[in-house]
Image (cartoon, coloured by chain):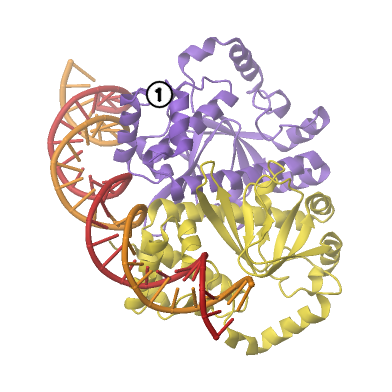
Chain colours: A purple, B yellow, C orange, D red
DNA sequence: GCGGGGCGTTGACGTGCATCAATATGCTGG
DNA sequence: CCAGCATATTGATGCACGTCAACGCCCCGC
C-alpha cells in the first residue's frame, strides 16, 4: 500500500518516478504510464494504447479520507488508481459497514456501479491519492472498436469476481490468524508486482479497517499481529510491517492445522 | 429453487410450459424463451434478440450432482440456467470448500473463468438441470456488433460483483439468524421474479450447503430454522419451507437488534 | 511545548457458534 | 420392499472471538 523510504533508491524506481514527473502534469497518457503493465492497458499493442489514451483524459486528486464516489451516486465512470490507495466500503441499512476491498496503484475501481447505473459502495482514499477517470460510455464505445480492450475489461471484471469469492472463502471458513496471514501475503504479493519490497511495507488501513475487511474486531487483529510477532513471523511497529518468515505465514494461511 | 406442485395450475405457468414444450427440443431460441425477461436477453429489441439466437446454439443437460464445469478446466463458455439449479463451490488447497452461490433459472454461470481463461470454481447441479451454452469468443464478437448486448453483459457481471459484496457483508457482520433470514428473503424474492410463490417453496440445497454458503455449520442452520419455526416466522418440514411472517424475517435481517 | 483525540495494545470476562454425540427420518438403488 | 446411507434434528460441552475496560503512543493543531 506504500513503499518504505529505502526503496526510492532502486534504479527502476528512480526511472519510473522520473517518467511520472515529466509527463503526469502535461497529459494523461497510458502509453507512458509506469503502471501500464498492471493497469487497464496491460496487453494492448501501441496502436490500441493510442486508442485508450483518447479515452482516459482526466485525472482527479482525492485527499486522504475523502470519497472518490459514494454509494447511491449516479455512475458514469470507472477509475484507475494512479497514486495512493483506497478502501471500498458498503454500508448497511442499520449503519454497520464492511470494507469490501483495498485498491492500490494500477487497480480498477467502480465496476460495481455498472449494473444499476449507480454506485453501490463508497470509495475512500486512505492517503492523498490520484485516479485516472474512465468515462463508462466511452469505454463501451472503445471496447467495441478495440477488441483487445473489450476483452481485457471483461478480464478485469472477472478477476474482481474471483477476488471477491476468495474473500468469501476467507470470511466463511478461515479463522482469525489464517485471515490475517492471507491478508499480509496478498498485500505482499501485490506490492511485489508493483516493484515495492514484498517483505517490508507500511500498512495504510487502520486495525479497524483491516478488521472490517477480514470480518473481525480490531482487538482481534491487534492480537493476531502480536501473536505473529511473538512467534517471530513478522516484526510490527504500528503500521510498519516486516515479514520475517514468509513460509511460516504461508503455512498458517494454507495448511490449516488446528 | 423449485416450485411447489400447486403452482403448476397458474395460467401464466401453463402457457410458459407449453411454449417450452413445443420449442425447446426443436431449436434453442432466446426470443421465445420464457426466461427472456430475466436472462441475458433482457432489454434487447427483436433484431438484437435475433443476433443473440445465433450465438446461443446449444443446450446441455446436467444430472443432479454432476458438474457443469470444474475448477481448473479451460474456460470457453458461460452458461445460462434454463431448467434446474446449481451451486458454485470453490475448493481450498487443504480440501475445505465454500459454496459461493446458488444459481436458478435465468441466471448466468461461469463468468469467474474469463479472467484466467480457466474456471475458478465447480458448478454442481442441485437437481437434474439444463443450461444454454454461450461460447465466450462468440459472445465477445456479438457484443461488439450489438452494443446493447455488450452493455447488458457488463451489467450482468457488475451485478455479480455487487451480489458477492452482499455476501461478504453477510459473512463479515451478520449473526447466524440474520444470515439465514437474509438467505430466505433473497430466495423468496428470486422465486417471485420467476413467477413462483415467494412464500412457499422447496429448498434444493442441503443444510450443509446452506451452511457452507452462509459461513456456518449445518447444526447451526438447523437450529436457526427450528428457532424461526418456534417463533412462528416460518413452517419447516425438511426442505419444504413456508414463510408465515415476512416482516418479522425482514426485521431480523435488517434491524439487527441484539 | 502542550493538550487532545485517534489509534494501538493488552487483559479479564462473556457468549455465539462449533464440536461431539445420539437418534430420527427419508431417499435410493438393488 | 427393504437395507443402507445421506440428511436432519436436538442436546451437552468447549472454545475462539467479541466485548468492555484501562492505558500508552503518536500526531496534529494551537
Q: Percent x, y for residue B148?
A: 77, 58
Specify the subunit that label 1 lies on.
A
Q: Percent x, y for residue B55?
A: 84, 59
Using the image, determine if residue B216 lies above or below residue A142. below
Q: Percent x, y for residue B208?
A: 47, 61
Question: Label 1 neighbourhood size at 10 Å, few (<14), some (14-19), many (20+)?
Answer: some
Residue at point 59%, 12% (across, down): A14
Using the image, determine if residue B211 lies above or below residue B32. above
Mark 1: secondary structure: strand
Image quarter of the C terminus of chain A: top left
Q: Percent x, y for residue C3?
A: 16, 28
In front of the other: D12 or B46: D12
| Residue matched to label 1 | A241
Using the image, determine if residue D7 lies above or below residue A155. below
In front of the other: C23 or B179: C23
Residue at point 60%, 58% (across, down): A116
Residue at point 86%, 66% (across, down): B50
Q: Is residue B63 left or right of residue A244?
A: right
Residue B129 location, quadrant: bottom right
Q: Is residue A227 left or right of residue B155?
A: left
Residue A84 in view:
yes
In front of the other: A15 or A155: A155
Q: Is residue B169 left or right of residue B193?
A: left
Amino acid at each position: 500500500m506504500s513503499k518504505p523510504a529505502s526503496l526510492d533508491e532502486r534504479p527502476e524506481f528512480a526511472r519510473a518516478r522520473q517518467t511520472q514527473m515529466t509527463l503526469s502534469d502535461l497529459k494523461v497518457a497510458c502509453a507512458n504510464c509506469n503502471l501500464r503493465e498492471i493497469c487497464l492497458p496491460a496487453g494492448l499493442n501501441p496502436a490500441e494504447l493510442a486508442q485508450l489514451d483518447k479515452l482516459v483524459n482526466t485525472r482527479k486528486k482525492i485527499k486522504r479520507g475523502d470519497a472518490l464516489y459514494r454509494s447511491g451516486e449516479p455512475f458514469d465512470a470507472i477509475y484507475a488508481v494512479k497514486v495512493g490507495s483506497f478502501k471500498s466500503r458498503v454500508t448497511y441499512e442499520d449503519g454497520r459497514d464492511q470494507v469490501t476491498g483495498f485498491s492500490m496503484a494500477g487497480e480498477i475501481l467502480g465496476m460495481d456501479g455498472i449494473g444499476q447505473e449507480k454506485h453501490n459502495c463508497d470509495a475512500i482514499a486512505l492517503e492523498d491519492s490520484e485516479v485516472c477517470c474512465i468515462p463508462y460510455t466511452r469505454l463501451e464505445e472503445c471496447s467495441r472498436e478495440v477488441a483487445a480492450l473489450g476483452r481485457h475489461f471483461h478480464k478485469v471484471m472477472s478477476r474482481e469476481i474471483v477476488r471477491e469469492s476468495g474473500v468469501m472463502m476467507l470470511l466463511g471458513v478461515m479463522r482469525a490468524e489464517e485471515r490475517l496471514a492471507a491478508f499480509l501475503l496478498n498485500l505482499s504479493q501485490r506490492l511485489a508486482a508493483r516493484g515495492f519490497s514484498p517483505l517490508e511495507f507500511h500498512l495504510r488501513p487502520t486495525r479497524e479497517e483491516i478488521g472490517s475487511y477480514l470480518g473481525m474486531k480490531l482487538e482481534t487483529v491487534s492480537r493476531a499481529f502480536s501473536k505473529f510477532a511473538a512467534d517471530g513471523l513478522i516484526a510490527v511497529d504500528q503500521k510498519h510491517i516486516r515479514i520475517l518468515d514468509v513460509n511460516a505465514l504461508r503455512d498458517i494461511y494454507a495448511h490449516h492445522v488446528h
